[in-house]
Image: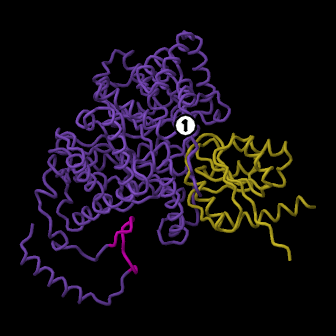
């Protein structure tokens, strides 16, 4: 049996906000949960999408604490669409984001939004379930 | 403090008492403070048997300052109520400041946006949508006029929460504005954060200068304001341990980071030829008021004694004012939850009470909606009222250091002090001053380990957080979300466009050249920054000179 490929996750911060506890905590947590984490840190939207393609990731995780989650999500989804990775790469967003905006971000194209107090396991479980589903969809 | 035979009798009685409770099952297998200090069932005079009251505790305003930094403390004047506040545009923030002032706030504090923090102008596409979303944008001198319009800044102190990369230009814009309003800046009261570790460990910087250059910029501002006496009443630095504590480090590490940071700056200024008494009285601290009530109170008491010893023994300060450890407080934002947000009001009230019992000089109380968005008017008013209830209704400020003499609090004060000295030794062994500890990544590792430890503690239920891992509510009404000004980006870009049209662009270029030369030669940057910002140079223009001459830095973050 071939060794199963580890799920690959790119973790990045769009913009210049320096709240870093969230991204480091989730990155280490996902790595401990058996995933391959590529730590992008601060990256422009263009750099994030480029890295996602180069590194052939399954998931892009954005950490946003600046309250600019709506414009950043719009920009990344539009570029993911343009580069043809919108359907193959799962976009998840975390940070201080009002619950009322979670639905809006999902309408824009985020698969899920995780706020403060989310257990790491919940994020890891979500990724495992939805990455598979996403791969099936793109394979069909 | 106690007679030896009396202590013996107490200890004998304690043994009997312990026998009585032997085998009684307790709530937890072990009791410890948030920082992991083991806690006994009970403390008695035997736990502080070695105390010499006059030497180890003393009187308020007297060595070793455990009971307070001033002789009269809150009997003569309450702490300053200073709510950290800023969003949208300088005009929007001015409205909020006026509201808070009318409601009884006694000091102002500007939370700046992420572009101001990182020295970036609003045209930059890497940050154009973050203008005013997390604080007030302060990109030029015009912004300062708008921010303070109609407010008595000659009588009330203002805190500018900016870090070493942008602190010199932002303070310079503020000082120039004050001059323009006819205020003598030698009398100007206020403070800026100007804290390397906030810029690097509290947050990570975006295209900022390397740590040794941050230290230089921070010390340039201190030197120009205080020993050179340009703005002598200004507090040109606040060692903001609050910001690193928010990452999850404990109370011992919080003080360790803070004192190591202060030592690094003091050493640099002494290296520049100043005497400690020339400037040290203006260096201030900004601590956290975290969850563990008694530990926090003991932390403030221990911090005052540590500072006194540092000044007296290490630096041989002679001026009694050099011994005063003064601090601002922020209640712990990281203790707030997005779940059941009204519970945050209660958390904040307890934390604020600890800060008052610990003798703070000024305080910010968080709003209940801060784990969700920037504070709404309703939420910030309640945060303000929390402090006013403590001042006017509880009576806790009517005697000085009311917990002094509590066997537990005195014991814990000693215990924290001892642990902080040990931690400082550990920091010295790990690399020395904070610049080296940033360069070699040690501080980043301490922070990242703390992130992970806290997350695991909450995920595994070892640290109980109401609404997160216990007492969950089935139905939750999300609170009203406060939205910042969506047009802030456009407004600020327009503000800069108009400024650039109006100013003498050639003169600005020349003055930026002067700054370039000062940076290059290692001269104090402040005179050049004052001139450039007065002539209308923007924050981004000044910071780009820094980047160009001093270089940029990527922090060695490990996950």
Q: Who is closer to the viewer here, B381 or A46?
A: A46
Quadrant of the rendered image containing residue B131: top right
Which range is magenta? B27-38
- Lateral position of residue B211 relative to residue B11, left or right: right
Q: Quadrant of the N terminus of chain A?
A: bottom right
Q: What x and y, as percent, mark residue B182?
A: 34, 15
Q: Position of residue B179 (x, y in %)?
A: 36, 17
**Residue in view at x 20 percent, y 41 percent:** B317
Look at mark 1 in the image and give the residue it sits on.
B208
Q: Is residue A11 left or right of residue B442?
A: right
Viewer-nearest residue: B124 or B331: B124
**Which chain is displayed in yellow in the rendered image?**
A
Q: Which chain: purple?
A: B
The spot of residue B557 in percent (x, y) is: 57, 52
**Residue A130 falls inside the magenta stretch:** no
Relative height, residue B308 to residue B461 (above, below): above
Quick one: B466 or B318, which is closer to the camera? B318
Residue furthest to the right = A140
State which chain disc 1 sits on: B
Within 10 Å of disc 1 (Cα), the crowding (few <14, some 14-19, many 20+) is: many
Please indicate whether residue B1 sits to the left or right of residue A40 in the image.
left
């Amino acid at each position: 049996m071939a060794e199963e490929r580890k799920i690959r996750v790119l973790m990045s911060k769009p913009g210049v906000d320096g709240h870093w506890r969230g991204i480091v905590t989730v990155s280490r947590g996902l790595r401990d949960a058996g995933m391959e984490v590529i730590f992008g840190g601060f990256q422009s939207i263009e750099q994030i999408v480029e890295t996602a393609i180069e590194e052939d990731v399954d998931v892009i995780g954005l950490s946003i604490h600046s309250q600019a989650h709506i414009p950043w999500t719009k920009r990344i989804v539009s570029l993911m669409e343009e580069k043809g990775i919108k359907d193959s790469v799962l976009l998840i967003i975390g940070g201080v984001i009002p619950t009322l905006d979670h639905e809006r971000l999902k309408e824009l194209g985020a698969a899920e939004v995780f706020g403060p107090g989310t257990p790491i396991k919940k994020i890891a479980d979500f990724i495992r379930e939805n990455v598979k589903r996403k791969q099936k969809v793109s394979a069909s | 403090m106690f007679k030896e035979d009396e202590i013996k009798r107490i200890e004998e009685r304690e043994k009997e008492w312990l026998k009585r409770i032997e085998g009684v099952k307790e709530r937890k297998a072990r009791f410890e403070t948030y920082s992991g200090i083991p806690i006994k069932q009970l403390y008695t005079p035997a736990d502080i048997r070695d105390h010499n009251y006059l030497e180890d505790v003393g009187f308020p305003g007297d060595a070793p300052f455990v009971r307070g930094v001033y002789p009269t403390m809150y009997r003569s004047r309450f702490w300053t109520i200073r709510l950290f506040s800023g969003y949208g545009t300088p005009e929007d923030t001015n409205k909020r400041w006026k509201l808070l002032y009318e409601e009884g706030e006694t000091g102002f504090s500007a939370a700046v946006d992420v572009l101001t923090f990182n020295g970036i102008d609003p045209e930059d596409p890497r940050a154009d949508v973050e203008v005013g979303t997390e604080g007030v944008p302060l990109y030029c001198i015009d912004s300062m006029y708008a921010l303070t319009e109609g407010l008595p800044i000659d009588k009330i102190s203002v805190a500018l929460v900016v870090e070493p990369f942008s602190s010199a230009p932002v303070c310079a814009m503020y000082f120039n504005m004050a001059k323009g309003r006819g205020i003598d800046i030698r009398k100007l009261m206020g403070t800026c954060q100007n804290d390397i570790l906030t810029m690097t460990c509290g947050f990570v910087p975006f295209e900022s200068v390397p740590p040794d250059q941050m230290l230089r910029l921070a010390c340039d501002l201190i030197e120009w304001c205080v020993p050179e006496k340009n703005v002598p009443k200004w507090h040109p630095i606040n060692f903001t341990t609050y910001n690193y504590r928010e990452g999850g480090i404990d109370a011992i590490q919080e003080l360790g980071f803070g004192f190591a940071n202060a030592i690094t700056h003091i050493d640099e200024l002494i290296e520049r030829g100043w005497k400690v008494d020339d400037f040290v009285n203006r260096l201030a601290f900004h601590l956290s008021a975290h969850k563990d009530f008694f530990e926090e109170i003991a932390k403030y008491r221990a911090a005052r004694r540590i500072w006194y010893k540092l000044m007296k023994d290490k630096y041989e300060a002679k001026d009694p004012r050099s011994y005063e450890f003064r601090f601002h407080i922020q209640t712990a934002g990281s203790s707030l939850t997005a779940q059941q947000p009204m519970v945050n009001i209660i958390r904040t009230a307890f934390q604020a009470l600890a800060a008052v019992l610990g003798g703070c000089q000024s305080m910010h109380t968080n709003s209940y909606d801060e784990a969700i968005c920037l504070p709404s008017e309703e939420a910030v008013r309640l945060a303000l009222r929390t402090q006013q209830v403590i001042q006017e209704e509880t009576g806790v400020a009517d005697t000085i250091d009311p917990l002094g003499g509590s066997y537990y609090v005195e014991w814990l004060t000693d215990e924290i002090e001892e642990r902080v000295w040990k931690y400082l030794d550990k920091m010295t062994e790990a690399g020395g001053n904070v610049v080296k500890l940033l360069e070699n990544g040690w501080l980043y590792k301490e922070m990242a380990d703390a992130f992970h430890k806290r997350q695991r503690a909450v995920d595994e239920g070892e640290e109980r957080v109401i609404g997160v891992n216990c007492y969950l509510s089935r139905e939750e009404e999300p609170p009203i979300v406060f939205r910042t000004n969506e047009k802030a980006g456009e407004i600020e870009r327009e503000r800069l466009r108009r400024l650039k049209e109006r100013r003498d662009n050639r003169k600005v270029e020349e003055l930026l050249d002067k700054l370039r030369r000062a940076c290059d030669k290692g001269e104090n940057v402040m005179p050049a920054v004052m001139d450039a910002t007065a002539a209308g140079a923007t924050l981004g223009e000044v910071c780009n000179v820094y980047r160009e001459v001093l270089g940029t830095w990527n922090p060695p973050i490990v996950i």
